[in-house]
Amino acid sequence: MKSFSQAVTEIYENDSRFHPDAYTLLKEALDFTVNAIVEKEKKPRHVNGPELMLGFRDFALAEFGPMTKPLLKEWGITKTRDIGDMVFNLIQVDVFSKEEGDSPSDFDRIYTFKEAFEKPFLPLS
């Protein structure tokens, strides 16, 4: 079985849109989201696209604060669909799994990056 790092290297050789560190952030955000669900519901379960995007937002903001949006842009991530594309890249190399009916489009327009990663740091008007 290949390591996460090996899987990301394989993905990056075929699709260099997203920096390898972005995949590490995504994996950590998924772990964060699953743990939050387990804490709330007392059992693990599949995380859907919108749930992952909310967890990703919360985790990224906690990790990088106001630098989140510029960092994501530097890593090639400018919209929620980019995360969906990354998820499905990880599914293709058997790192993540999916359920019947899951699709990259599940990640379309969950929120704008301006709303998620800039607005929390703007002064109240």
Image (cartoon, grey):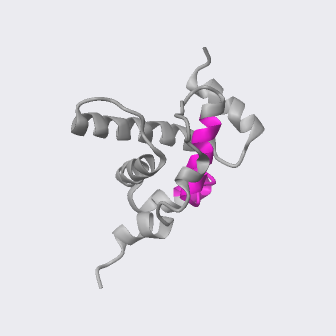
At x 43%, y 46%, the residue is: 52
In the rendered view, tell whether residue 57 sits above or below residue 2.
below
Q: Position of residue 31 (x, y in %)?
A: 40, 35
In the rendered view, tell whether residue 77 sits above or below residue 111.
above
Q: The magenta stretch spans which residues?
A: 71-90
At x 30%, y 39%, the residue is: 37
In the rendered view, tell whether residue 6 sits above or below residue 67.
above
Task: Give the left or right position of residue 64, taking residue 8 as reference.
Answer: left
Can you name the residue that lies furthest to the right here?
A: 14
Q: Position of residue 3 (x, y in %)?
A: 58, 21
Quadrant in which the N terminus is drawn: top right
At x 28%, y 80%, the residue is: 124
Asked where in the image residue 72 lies, by quadrant, the reply is bottom right
Verify whether residue 74 appears in magenta.
yes
Asked where in the image residue 93 lies, by quadrant, the reply is top right
Can you name the residue that lies furthest to the top here?
A: 1
Q: Position of residue 54 (x, y in %)?
A: 39, 52
Quadrant in which the C terminus is drawn: bottom left
Q: Nearer the viewer, residue 93 or 65?
A: 93
Asked where in the image residue 13 lies, by quadrant, the reply is top right
